[in-house]
Amino acid sequence: MSEERDGGKPHLTRQGSLRRTSLLDAAESVLVAKGNADASLRAIAGEAGVRVGHLQHYFPTRADLIKAVLERALDRSLERLAETTGLRLDPADPSVIEVTEGSRADAAEVVAVVLAEQEDPQLVRLYVEVWALAARDEEIAAVVREFYRKYVAYVEAFVQQGRPEWSADLCRARAETFVALVEGAALMRSGIAGSRSGALDEQLARQAVGLLRD
Amino acid sequence: MSEERDGGKPHLTRQGSLRRTSLLDAAESVLVAKGNADASLRAIAGEAGVRVGHLQHYFPTRADLIKAVLERALDRSLERLAETTGLRLDPADPSVIEVTEGSRADAAEVVAVVLAEQEDPQLVRLYVEVWALAARDEEIAAVVREFYRKYVAYVEAFVQQGRPEWSADLCRARAETFVALVEGAALMRSGIAGSRSGALDEQLARQAVGLLRD
DNA sequence: TGTACATCAGTGAACGCGCGTTCACTGATGTAC
DNA sequence: TGTACATCAGTGAACGCGCGTTCACTGATGTAC
């Protein structure tokens, strides 16, 4: 039985699969530390402890590598959101959302977890890099749009679950406004556009919770 | 009477001053169109119709040029905010805010103007570029922090004016939350993280106005 | 009003450098018989 | 169980290219006397 294989992409051995992961780790670390413009293949290869030419064994071009790094990082964020909300996209049909846990998190908990996640400055730097890349590169823009589509879908489902009497349009608008507030909060709290304070965190949480349920 | 002069910076003639402005225009246009990584001095000089070597007559290094572009663009945004709110920072002491017009704009108007401004996709691209640059370059980070400090100061003064009974801390927290919501809205409405819709705009406006006065 | 001179405006060629990519190559690993 | 062979893992040197910067230079403009 011969397997379908796409192009010249090599089949990964166990060792190769580990190596691929370690290259993605190295690339993400350099990308966050130095920004896209300064994250050269040489810097990434150095971080990973391999030679430059070897990167192309796993990622033929630099664009392939960067795209893979961002896809993995954004998927990780969605995974955390799924755990926090107790919801999950149906892998077969990502427009359907299932409830995975009996006990539903409440709005304040979801907001607290989302804001706590932003306290990792490296993650915020990665997001800012992602936005800038998406504004220039259509392939990355597609990855980013898909991420936010799912992000909003989770929040919308969460709102709908708590307020079954609200229309789908209202739940969607509130979910989009919630995401806007949270992404803007990342900027204001990260040192880029402002800095954290107790009063700001309290006001942000009040607004975010209100969007989810009031 | 001899004038103080800093370093080798040339004195600008009328013609030179116009040229400097046209170089900033060209640089801003290329920066928005291609992003920082692809906005080379050759591309900028080409856009301006001069030779590469000539750029350094006005801006000794690329960093000087980019910084000047961003400073000018951010100042322009603050200028529009001053007009919209009918307030103005005291040039002598920027922590003091003066009322410049008798008739004060209401919160809904301010929100409408701010959201309308975001409908220029080039401006949003510039902002995203600014955030990414600020995360890497300390000199630009300082410019950006100063911009948001003033931005928040305007909004805080506007809130305080409408709600004199609120504490300074509350006005400040609401102003910061307002800015977070608005900057996040730029991402959600620009095509980077989402797209505009009437329902979203309505929900955003409701939240933003509420932050300013309810 | 003219002239001399300092400064500004702008050119054009060259520089060294780091970049992403290419490619021929050597060992290591897995697999078919 | 052994052997042959295909594929994978990883090396290392070289490539052409575009980059920011440097610098010696020529005209244009303003100004002092």
Image (tube, coloured by chain):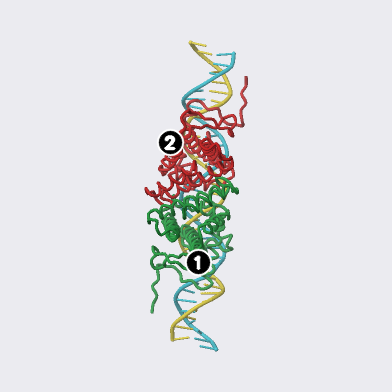
Chain colours: A red, B green, C cyan, D yellow
- What label sits on residue A49 in the rendered view? 2
Tell me the SS state at disc 2.
Answer: loop
Residue lying at 43% horizontally and 66% vertically, measured from the top left: B98
Compared to A25, does A187 lie above or below?
Answer: below
Where residue A31 sits in the image (x, y, percent)? 46, 43
Where residue A157 sits in the image (x, y, percent)? 54, 36
- Does residue B132 appear in the picture of this structure? no
Compared to D29, does B110 lie above or below?
Answer: above
Q: Using the image, name the chain to which the residue with label 2 belongs.
A: A
Residue lying at 43% horizontally and 65% vertically, measured from the top left: B89
In the image, what residue type sits under mark 1?
Ser
Tell me the SS state at disc 1.
Answer: loop
- Same subunit: marks 1 and 2: no
- The N terminus of chain B lies in which quarter of the figure? bottom left
Q: Is residue C33 left or right of residue A189?
A: right
Do labels 1 and 2 touch, CB within 8 Å?
Answer: no
Q: Is residue D17 left or right of residue A73?
A: right
Where residue B124 sits in the image (x, y, percent)? 54, 53
Disc 1 target residue: B103
In the image, what residue type sits under mark 2?
Gly
**Disc 1/disc 2 C-alpha distance (Å):** 65 Å
The one of A147 and A18 positioned closer to us in this rendering: A147
Q: Using the image, name the chain to which the residue with label 1 belongs.
A: B
- What label sits on residue B33 in the rendered view? none
- Viewer-side label of 1, 2: 1
